[in-house]
Image (cartoon, coloured by chain):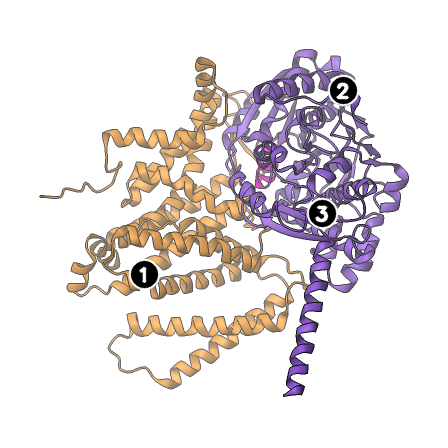
Amino acid sequence: MLGPFLETLIGGLLTGVLYSLVALGFVLIFKASGVFNFAQGAMVLFAALTVARLAGEIDNKEVHLANFVVAAAILGVALALVGWYCWREYVARGSGAPERRKIQMLAALGAIVGGGAAWLYGKGAWPMWLAIAATAAIMGLLAYAIERLVLRHLVNQEGIILFMATLGIAYFLDGFGQTLWGSDIYTINLGLPKDPIFLLEGVFPGGLLVDPGDLVAAVIAAALVVVLAIFFQTTRVGRALRAVADDHAAAQSVGIPLKTIWLIVWTVSGFVALAAGLIWGAKLGVQFSISLIALKALPVLILGGFTSVPGAIVGGLIIGAGEKLSEVFLAPILIRAFDLAGGGIENWFAYVLALVFLLFRPQGLFGERIIERV
Amino acid sequence: MRLRTAALLGAAIAAAGLTVAATAQAQNEQFIPGLIYRTGAYAPNGIPFANGVADYYALVNERDGGINGVKIVYEECDTGYATDRGVECYERLKNKGPTGAAYVNPLSTGITFALTEKAPVDKIPVISMGYGRSESRDGSVFQWNFPLLGTYWSAADIIMQHIALKEGGFDKLKGKKIVLVYHDSPYGKEPIALLEQRAKMHGFTFTPMPVTHPGVEQKATWLQIRQNRPDYVLLWGWGIMNSTSIKEAAAVGFPREKLFGVWWSGAEPDVRPAEGGAKGYHAAMLQHGSGQFGVHADLKKYLYDKGKGAAKWDETGEVLYNRGLVNAMLGVESIRKAQTKFGNKPLTGEQVRWGIENLDLSAARLKELGFEGMLQPLKVTCSDHEGTRAGRIQQWDGAKWVVVSDWYQSDDKVIKPMVDAAAKKYADEKKLSVRDCSKEG
């Protein structure tokens, strides 16, 4: 009995780390803008689809190369201009008016890089590193578009308005991603090991099974979580993010550039979506259902608190382990004891677990306690 | 002035002529709705099926000028495999065309369940080829349902017969452990009754294990399978659930040779994402498998060479594309059959229902239609809306599906009493009048 219990626990914890990774995307944006970003799942799908299609085998009948070269050149120009804009805004602020020649050169460079990339795309599959880098750039561009076209117009609006806006972004990204890249199941090959590992074979009959793919994915996810935690706790940008989360207007009044902070946080969140998309995509195959993984992050957020990076980590571990253990050990007992019709319980049991925790800590395990004086 | 009047008059006559011609043409069209899904979680499986259906209707129009001169007008509606959206699509399309929908293919057991009560009211037959309620093959109760080619009870029985044959007979199953990993939906639950019955008869342990929609997280299920060490696992999944199951089976080291999928878990999108992990996996066949047959030559000549195909040519031999072709062909042949009684004109759902119920496709006719090698002859009757109960088993060799068994017939000695009991229960619950099929001509 101990063997199966430990095996399920390990499997659940490893899955939990991956839930944490998705939950982290939500936490980042909530911390910086007080917005519950419903589009996080759609961003995971969009990023994964982009990587999978760029790195995947190309069917030449499908690609009209000439059109694609033009489109990629335009994208290249746009990326170059965004790069220039960011550089001007955040690095060389106050260095004088932008030079026309610099813009022209950057646009030309973008067109060459974009067109070259498209030519490479037409020749066959991209190497994985290039596909990931290009997708990171595209996620940055997406963050810029979201900030410029949606969020900027909603400064100082109620949180629910911003939430509804992200709902719209989610549906747009889900549909647009599939229209652009297709609805088939695509594979991402990160070279994760596949042969199962058996631990403590001498102690437990058959040993304890550990999925090495899950193990590597969990290590990558954990490393990312640590980096982000450090970024938020120790850097100036991290402090500015927290200030913006507390009060947009007050933060602006002391000189914190709201637009900049939002762009940074949506970009970082896009990168987290890319990491989650890569790992989940390699595990399951890239397809629409990946966006539903975001639903797995909700109980993690309820449990860990919407504003806490450590909360996302611990919440993920508890939910991952809790849902697997409940499915394997609790479900049969419940079904037998109450003569139930049956059915999986892990999906809804995760929420029950989170709600039970809320009874004792309404702000979540690590959430900030909100005290408002009246 | 005179010239202007003449011009106006001419234009009016031409417009009137065009309108009359268009109306006349519209009057000679048979409307068929297509409840499909090209988006959402199940799109990878929905798209090839939808392409097969669309191509076959287009082929009949291009090659034959329609069904005995009656053009097919086909309109798709994307349900996303969601029952509410499926019902919405049905409501939107059921009255289109001069005679309304000829029939409806819900392409989802959940939507089939929902439409089963609407169909008798709207008088539109429901063709659920290879899915739907298993007891709906009893036409005396389910007058408007046609689970052509096979129900899930037939599918489960065919798989069990194959396993028994490998073990040396049903008596050798005593003491064995068989698990069903199923999509936690009406679809996934369908085979449970048959497998429980077989377990009772032969003394094996049967354990159903649900997987919640969409089936991307199955770690707990497969850890239980590893711990319980069953002899065989049956898979009743759809979409990404299938490839995830196969991947998880590989991850826990469960032999893929002992994993058997239903015919909705045995197509290329189910095995390709699992890559090498899928090698050896078995699946039941809804008669046909992959590959190109006579009908594909016509598709190439009349559609693909002219750039009118819905899919890419390489995909036209895939399992689900072929299933779409078969599904559309059975519908077209039912309309053709109904035309022998009601005339070569657009028909109502009620008239087409008669055509489906009297559908009789011989081997010679199947050959003529280009489906030789894909299907066995079938004959639908008032009491048997399934038409045939034959199937085979195929195995994925890492690159393609290989047929590894002879034809099986599901055992009606086991299934018929179950169908009768379930159909009677349904009729009693809904207070339906039961037809006496012995009196139907």
Describe the element under mark 3 as helix, strand or loop. helix
Residue wearing tag 1: A151
**Above-or-below relation of B200 to B1:** above
Element at label 1: helix
- Against B1, is A26 above or below? above
Residues at badges 1 and 2 in contact (C-beta under 8 Å)?
A: no
Instruction: Let me know if residue B250 is in the magenta part.
Output: yes
Q: Which residues are magenta?
A: B240-253
Residues at marks 3 and 2, CA–CA distance in whole angstroms: 30 Å
- Image position, residue A100 (x, y; %): 37, 85
Chain identifier, colour orange? A
Q: Amino acid at mark 2?
A: Asp
Q: Which residue is mark 2?
A: B412
Q: Position of residue A185 (x, y in %)?
A: 59, 48
Q: Label 3: how many residues lie within 10 Å, few (<14), some (14-19) or many (20+)? A: many
Q: Position of residue A46 (x, y in %)?
A: 48, 55
Image quarter (top left, top right, bottom left or bottom right) of the C terminus of chain A: top left
Give, as a three-letter code, the residue at label 3: Tyr
